[in-house]
Amino acid sequence: MHHRNKWIPLDRALTDIQAATDCAREAAHHMLVSVCVEERARTRWRLHQLGTRSIPARDWLGASVSETINGIVKASGSRMAGVEISDDDLQVLFPPAPSSTRKKSARKLLAGIDALFACYPDGIPDHVDNNTILAVTFAWLKANRSEVHMGNRTMLRAAGRAK
């Protein structure tokens, strides 16, 4: 039997991310944008009678989530209302009902994503090496979120550079 991908609206995806990671709504926005920039979650734009089209990672780069339109505002300022996310991908990235260990790990990953967005708001340039990413983001964490401690691998996972 062939499994069909289930698509869910952006607001439901944010709710699922919040539930899985025990994070604030704004943090769920950042996490969703991050996984879409890294092409770890498939997304599409519902175009009313015209059907749908997939949303490329470049459209997510520098974008912000707008729950008012249930979509995104791209870095250029153009809006994409009616964004849907692959539920299958979200279930893999953010499994429901996490254990306390998984919640702690998700919080660290979220702190890493926050640091990456603060240090590299337009995304990490390809020429930046892992050691530079670690130095810059850990310095930001020390100055802004001193209570968060994580290893290099967790930060590189947040950056999409490690599994």
Image (cartoon, helix red, strand yellow):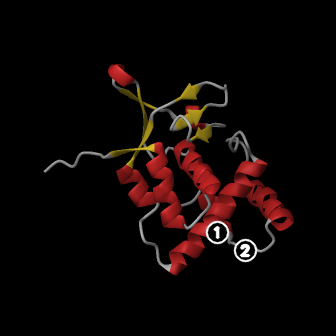
Residue 125's place in the image compared with 158, above or below, is: above
Outermost residue, right side: 143
Q: Earlier in the sequence, mark 2 or mark 1?
A: 1
Q: Residue 78 in the image: x percent, y percent? A: 61, 24
- Find numbered disc 1 in the image and state the secondary structure of the residue it sits on: helix
Q: Residue 133 in the image: x percent, y percent? A: 74, 55
Residue at 76%, 50% (x, y): give it. 118
- Inspect the image, locate mark 1, and give the three-letter code of the amino acid beneath it: Lys
Q: Are marks 2 and 1 in contact (CB under 8 Å)?
A: yes
- Inspect the image, locate mark 2, and give the three-letter code of the amino acid beneath it: His
Q: Is residue 139 left or right of residue 60?
A: right
Residue at 67%, 41% (x, y): give it. 126
How would you rate the neighbour count of disc 1 (Cα within 10 Å): few for under 14, some for 14-19, many for 20 or more?
Answer: some
How many numbered marks appear? 2
Residue 162's place in the image compared with 124, above or below, is: below
Tag 2 residue: 149
How would you rate the neighbour count of disc 2 (Cα within 10 Å): few for under 14, some for 14-19, many for 20 or more?
Answer: few
Tag 1 residue: 108
Residue at 75%, 60% (x, y): give it. 134
Q: Is residue 7 left or right of residue 75?
A: left
